[in-house]
Amino acid sequence: MLAKDDLFMKLSELGIPSYRGKQIMHAVYKEGVNSYEQITTLPREMLSGLQNICPIFSLRPLLMKKSKDGMTEKCLFATSDDKRIESVLMNFKDGRHSVCVSSQVGCQLGCKFCATGTMKFGRNLSYEEIADQVLYFAQELHLKGERVSNIIYMGMGEPFMNYENVMKSALLINDKSALGIGARSITISTSGICEGIEKLTEEPLQVNLAVSLHAPNQPLREKIMPIARKYDLAKLMRAIETYIKETHRRVSYEYVMLAGINDGEKEARELAALVKDQLCHINLIPYNATGIAGITGSEKKQIRAFRDVLKQAGVEVTIRVTMGQEIDAACGQLANKAEKNTL
């Protein structure tokens, strides 16, 4: 669904007054309506024009997979130009509902452990395509009297390589006349695009920053994350420290646990030293196997040992709860299979 200003402009082109736009937004975002035919306040002769010029959804759901426990749902979408993207809804026992969204078709970064990284890069998503991933699940939850509580830009693609559309989608998601999700409940993740961190530092919308770190030293980070060759670890940490200093907001570091690669005691001590005295939190992520040759996840015992080294060094750390392994919930798995016709 278009943002308010864009919707009003489209309606104006049709000679439709702006108050109709308010009716449409209320019906879609507050009442869970997913077609113009269901909006009874609109004149019937207006409906076909609306659907053609500003459809409620810019995406078409192709495949939905749910975990056996019902806690995780993943949807494969088709864009209007028939590209494949995916989003995940995570339902928590405490009543929270988090949606992980994609910001690009494929990804340019080629991280060695990531299913999306094995795909060809297609294009950036529009702000509407990003926000509609959330709207899709929001309307599903509306039927149960529930709502989306958190948004995470951690799906397919690098958000800061599509900065303008990502931020515009966040503003739409935050808009009280739309989904009305608080800025502090929105997290944008980056693999280390320093310019994006610098821009986010200046943004009035106070969203959270997460950094996909995955290695505590430059050689190892370059080995598993090619983007590190352009944005070395020292430069990245300077950008993060400036962000913390200027915003007074905590940074989350994402650290996927890869057996025999980044999960040893040496790496744990290096990581503790790297973030010492920072306003930060580290999420240790058990690896959701993607079938990439030579990459396996760390054993639970090893992850706990790694965590204990960090805790003893005074670093705030948690082990992320694993969700959706049986439904290919890791970033890019469904879209990758669709691209290769192996669904």
Image (cartoon, helix red, strand yellow):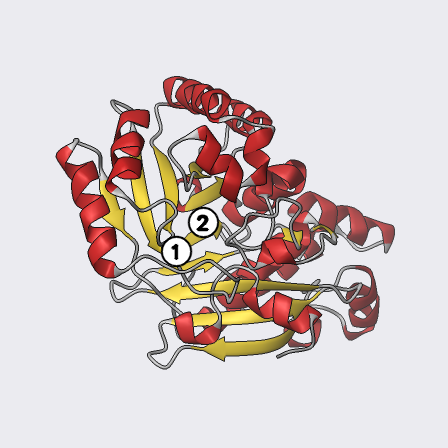
Q: Position of residue 25 (x, y in %)?
A: 61, 57
Residue in the foreground of this view, choosing between 11 and 330: 330
Residue at label 1?
149
Q: Secondary structure at mark 2?
A: loop
Residue in the foreground of this view, choosing between 57 and 231: 231
Q: Residue furthest bottom?
A: 68
Residue at label 2?
181
Q: Position of residue 152 (x, y in %)?
A: 46, 50
Q: Is residue 169 visible?
A: yes
Q: Position of residue 128 (x, y in %)?
A: 67, 53
> What kind of residue is marked 2?
Ile
- Left or right: 309 as drawn, with respect to 112: left
Say whether marks 1 and 2 touch (CB < 8 Å).
yes
Q: Residue at x 76, y 59 (%)?
A: 54
Q: Residue at x 53, y 49 (%)?
A: 173
Q: CA distance from mark 1 to mark 2?
A: 7 Å
Quarter occupied by the C terminus: bottom right
Q: Is residue 22 visible?
A: no
Q: Residue furthest left?
A: 312
Q: Residue at x 23, y 53 (%)?
A: 302
Crowd rating for badge 1 (residues with CA inside 10 Å; few <14, some 14–19, many 20+): some
Q: Secondary structure at mark 1?
A: loop
- Left or right: 253 as drawn, with respect to 53: left
